[in-house]
Image (spheres, rainbow, N blue to C red):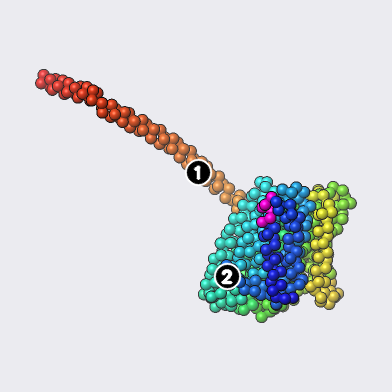
Amino acid sequence: MNSSLSIGLLLLGVIWPLLLTLMLTFRGGRSLAQHLAPWAALPALVACFLITPSDVHWDFPGLLLGSALGLDATGQVFLLLSALLWTVAGVYARAYFPLPEQRSRFYLFFMLAMAGNFGLIVAQDLPSFYFGFTLMSFAAYGLVVFNGDVAALRAGRVYIALVVVGELMLFVALLLAVQATDTTTFNAVRIALIDADNRDWIILLAFTGFGIKVGVIGLHVWLPLAHSVAPAPASAVLSGVMLKAGVLGWLRLLPIEDVVLPEWGSFMIVLGGISAFYGVIIGVTQRNPKTLLAYSSISQMGIITLFVGVGMLAPQAWSIILPSIAFYALHHGLSKGALFLGVGILGDSRRRQRCWVWFGLCLPALALAAAPWTSGMLAKNLVNSSVLYAPAPWSSFLPVLLSASAVATALLMARFLYLTRPAAKPFGLVPVTGLVWPWMVLLLAVLLAPWWLGSSLPEQAGKLQMIKSLWPILLALLVTVMVLKMNVFHSLRPVPAGDIFVLIERCFKPLYCMARKWLDILCFCSQIWQRYLFLMIRRVQNIMASILTLERGFTLWSRAIYFVVIIALGISLITFTAEF
């Protein structure tokens, strides 16, 4: 495809959602914009299939500090995932929100976040990436608080606070990174970071800033809070797409393929492993399916974090590890998006209708559990092959860790399927055609993903690989049956969504109450003091007014003469008294 047409198609993918957002703000174009909004991601989706990544790169010296747009192989995978999920979620949202006012408000934030997401994927320089990342992050706040209830506003406060902290850290990291080179392109910055004096500070700031979006353990608290209150189409893109923007930020900025980073690599492996199991341990206690899926995302993003750490330890194998990370992100995004959209249509109380939805949910759940002949099996095989390049002792420890993680993920998905079983309480909306068919399209994408991108799947699906993929599921099924017979979950209280944040909130609540009490006392004292000061000022003003009135009276000659006579008589009387 011609390079000018390719870059034009990429630009259209970013600009078109912004134009539709602008149309939504005008009453005359609002109706047309609502009809076009569900398909706002189509230009970007078309670009994924028509553009050859190596042929697309264009510099814009006059834009921002000098911008560059392009699409490499990694960006193409992330753009494919994003464009497909944004399209399906946009079409789903049209039926999810029956009122035009609701649709307009939702699509306003939805398309702003979409434009930022597409912009950061095609950006090849730091300012453009940061602009897109910031637009996506702040626009997503409108999706989190969309319902407007107390829980949504609380989740929004936590989310926006972490977003502001993350954006500040990224801004400082990007400034320090640009300081090390004369350009702002990612390639030049990565090379300059190899020998930069402040390299560790840049990595720390970038890891934390992007880690908030990824949901790394300790920075993950916004995820379960936001997913439990956000509408289903918003949750689908929050988990399926926006989490991956943080991963892409790591891949773009950090000098992973150029230098060995043993300390940072080990740190990310440990943190990723903790996230992988922490998400499962907290997730299995949940009774809200959306909250459980949020903790599942924390667990799965922990696996991706772990393999970014492996790349830091083995840069010589980065050309093998990077495609594995990209495919794992694609697999997780499609599967998690399908699960969230499926949860949104569990509102029918009829057992037969619920059965069809439940069977549909089984497909992405089995894919996340890495069942045979699914994208999860291919993703698992790819990451397992990457472990071979890790140095000792990680090369011996990580295969065991990944096997345990596979069992843990299967257990979590078994818990999810139990919560959404046909006999469970209805959850979400009643399935209608406008909700079901976009969800079915996404299920089809989950089913075909390993065949689209994994041409070697038949070779990888041999007897040995089938057994490796099947035994964690069988073990998880056995454990699930035992747990159900023991009736464990009925007596187990779910960990509150937000876990660490809730714990910190409870620990600081007495201090907060004490501070609030003293603040109320200070406010009361301040009000009394202000009242007293006001009365004193009024009294002084009255005295001064009396003096001025008296002074004006003395300006009359008759009164002045009377006053002089009275003073003279007084002095005479005092003198006469003193003589006797």
Asked whether 24 falls inside the magenta stretch, the response is yes
Give the residue at mark 1.
Answer: 519
Spatial separation of the CA atoms under disc 1 and disc 2: 52 Å
Magenta region: which residues? 22-27
Judge whether 315 appears above or below 579 on screen: below
Q: Callout 2 environment at 10 Å: few (<14), some (14 to 19), or many (20+)?
A: few
Tell me residue 48's x, y (percent).
Answer: 74, 70
Q: Amino acid at mark 2?
A: Gly
Position of residue 547 in the picture relative to residue 486 (left or right)? left
* Figure quadrant of the N terminus: bottom right
- The residue shown at (65%, 55%) is 141
Give the residue at mark 2.
Answer: 62
Viewer-proximal residue among 490 and 140: 140
**Residue 218 lies in what quarter of the image?**
bottom right
| Residue 19 appears in the rendering | yes
**Residue 60 lies in what quarter of the image?**
bottom right
Tell me residue 93's x, y (percent).
Answer: 76, 54
Total label count?
2
Viewer-proximal residue among 23 and 464: 23
Position of residue 557 in the picture relative to residue 456 (left or right)? left
Q: Are marks 1 and 2 in contact (CB under 8 Å)?
A: no
- The residue shown at (16%, 20%) is 573
Position of residue 221 in the picture relative to residue 566 (left or right)? right
Q: Main secondary structure of the magenta part?
A: helix
**Residue 160 lies in what quarter of the image?**
bottom right
Viewer-proximal residue among 222 and 105: 105
Mark 2 lies on a secondary structure that is: loop
| Residue 397 appears in the rendering | no
- Residue furthest to the left in view is 579
Q: Callout 1 environment at 10 Å: few (<14), some (14 to 19), or many (20+)?
A: few
